[in-house]
Image (spheres, rainbow, N blue to C red):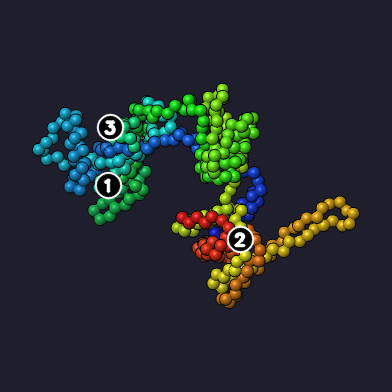
Amino acid sequence: MKLFLSIFISSLLLWACAFSTAHAQVKVKDLVDVEGVRGNDLVGYGLVIGLNGSGDTIRNSPYTEEALSNLLERLGVNIQGSDFRPNNVAAVIITATLPAFARVGSRIDINVSSIGDAKNLAGGTLVMTPLNAADGNVYAVAQGSVLISGFLAEGDGASVTEGVPTSGTIPGGALIEKEIGFSFASMSSIRLALRAPDFTTASRVESVINDQYGKPLATMLDAGTVELNLTGETRSPAALLAMIENYTLMPAQKARVVIDQRSGTIVLSTNVKVSAVAIAQGNLSITIAEAPEVSQPNPFAPGETMVVPRTSIQINDGAPGNIGMIESNVTLADLVAGLNSLGVSPREMMDILKTMKTAGALHAELILQ
């Protein structure tokens, strides 16, 4: 397994280095969000009925009985003073997202999750439930049959649970009853918010829009915002964005090392650099040095003088105490290639990278997950 991971990481690094000079053209729509064009979260409290004895127990979930009593009273059924102990009802929380530009009569998907001690929502039906936004107003009404991906099988002495049988979805289960007022067509300016703020990327977005549109339409306000001035434009804002969002550019890439400590995954960007540092990992020592050579043509021969890089990597797996020295600025790919040649595990590699970052020798943003 260790050998497989080492070969996989080495192949990944070689692939990244091979394509590091290629122009990764990305559409503007994949880099930015339009300010004001967003979804709104909805939430509601309701009841799922029709469960096969797997609902809430009234003793542990009294709010389920209260909600069911209120529902029946609104429907004209008086149950006051009766011994009402159903076990086929479950109290649930419904969550959904109201998309931007959603119109009355459209349907959206909803998620249904039990909040009591119900064991299984399979086969249940959600009773009509209003969904509220943060302002307290009702924007949609949910109802329908709950679909779950898990199951529960149990007997007298054992039980088996696969997935989460107490949470499910209802595709198209909510009907939009109210729209959110947003007059997009009357906007005189539009702000594009970069999902990953970066001054270089924002400058390139500004340049590509102005160059391809043929006039100074975009202005970079900061690392995360590019503003479009629509004054005097004959096109509608929607038509203008439909054209601009398909412009392509090469975004700037930050030097990053992402480490997922739970799964042992390491993801490296190709522009990570390592400066002079001494490394010792147990019995392991590594020395990386640069010895560039000058190549020049013979006298009076055509051609030009060029500097050819030469990287030397020496690895010592001898007695403890041997410390290698990185003599000059090299890429992290060179260092990891040396580690992989010795079969260093991802866990050990994580420790080395984190220690190098602490020492100030790893010139990249280190993200731990």
Residue 152 in the image: x percent, y percent? 31, 48
Kindly identify which numbered label has been placed on residue 274: 2
Is 40 placed above or below 265 here? Answer: above
* Most foreground residue, 46 or 212: 212
Q: Element at badge 1?
A: loop
- Tell me, yes or no, whether the two marked residues, 1 and 2, touch with CB atoms within 8 Å: no
- Tell me, yes or no, whether the two marked residues, 2 and 3, touch with CB atoms within 8 Å: no
Residue type, mark 2 in image: Val
Residue at (53, 45) in percent of width and height:
197
Nearest to N terminus: mark 3 or mark 1: 1
How crowded is the residue under tag 1: few (<14 C-alpha within 10 Å), some, or many (20+)?
many
Residue type, mark 1 in image: Lys
Kindly identify which numbered label has been placed on residue 119: 1
Is 180 placed above or below 205 here? Answer: above
Residue 314 in the image: x percent, y percent? 65, 68
Residue 61 in the image: x percent, y percent? 21, 46
Q: How many marks?
A: 3
Nearest to N terminus: mark 1 or mark 2: 1
Residue at (35, 33) in percent of width and height:
173
Question: In the displayed image of the protein, which residue is found farthest to the top?
Answer: 234
Residue at (54, 44) in percent of width and height:
223
